[in-house]
Image (cartoon, rainbow, N blue to C red):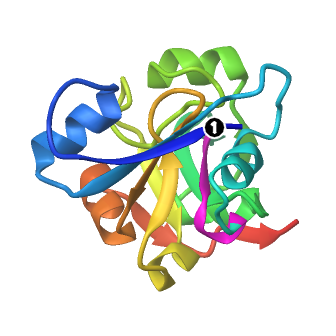
Amino acid sequence: MKNKTSVKRGGAGTPATVALVAAGINFSVHSYEHEAGAKAYGAEAAAALHLDPAVVFKTLIVDVDELPTVAIVPVNSMLDLKAHAARCGGRKAVMTEQDAAERLTGYVVGGISPIAQKRKLITVLDESALTLDIIYVSGGKRGLDIGLKPTDLVLVTDALTGSIARLS
C-alpha cells in the first residue's frame, strides 16, 4: 500500500481541509490507497499509515434520544453508548443508520470527518485524545486522514470531551 503525507497550508480539498485552512489551524494530510473490501476503516488507516491505533480516531454518528450526534473515539476501542448519551445530556443512544449518517454529514461512511459536516451536530471527543500531541481523524474521504492537535479539533468542531470509549 502506498501512502503519502503532506502538510496543507491552503488550496482546495475536502470540506474538512478547507474548513481547517479557513480557521487557520495547522494540520497534516495523510493519504493511502483504500482497499475496496475493507470494513474497519479506522484500523485500515492506522495500518496503512503505520500509526498506533490509539492515536487514530473514528467518527461515529449516534442518535441520542432520537437526535443525531457525533462521537469520536480511538479505533482500538468501542464507543460506550451509555456514556456518550449521558455526556450529550440524554438517556438512550443507538448507532445511526449508514445512509442517514451520510445524509447528515455530507460524507460517505468510511470517510466521515468530524470537521465541516453538512449539519452542526453535538460532538463528543473521547478524553483520551487530550493526552496526545497529535491525533488522526478522517479527512473527508476514504483513504485520507488529517493529523492535528486534539485541542484544535475541539475548537473547530466545538466538541465536548468525556470518557466515552472502552477497550474492545
Residue drawn where x is 77% and y is 63% of the image = 76
Which residue of the protein is positioned furthest toward the bottom in this rendering? 131
Query: As rendered, which of 125 and 6 lies closer to the eye?
Result: 6
Q: Position of residue 140 (x, y in %)?
A: 46, 31
For label 1, the SS is loop
Amino acid type shown at disc 1: Lys
- Residue 29 is drawn in which quadrant? top left
Direction from residue 46 to residue 11 in the image, left or right: left
Residue drawn where x is 49% and y is 85% of the image = 131
Q: Position of residue 78 (x, y in %)?
A: 79, 59
Specify few, some or many for label 1: CA neighbours under 10 Å numbering under 14, 14-19, or 20 or more.
Answer: few
- Residue 21 is drawn in which quadrant? top left
Could you tell me what secondary structure mostly forms the magenta stretch? Answer: strand
Which residue of the protein is positioned furthest toward the front in this rendering? 2
Direction from residue 84 to residue 12 in the image, left or right: left
The segment highlighted magenta reads 53-62
Direction from residue 137 to residue 25 in the image, left or right: left
- Quadrant position of the N terminus in the picture: top right
The mark total stands at 1
Residue placed under numbered mark 1 in the picture: 2
Q: Position of residue 20 (x, y in %)?
A: 23, 44
Residue drawn where x is 50% and y is 22% of the image = 107
Query: As rendered, which of 106 and 122 lies closer to the eye?
Result: 106
- Residue 34 is drawn in which quadrant? top right
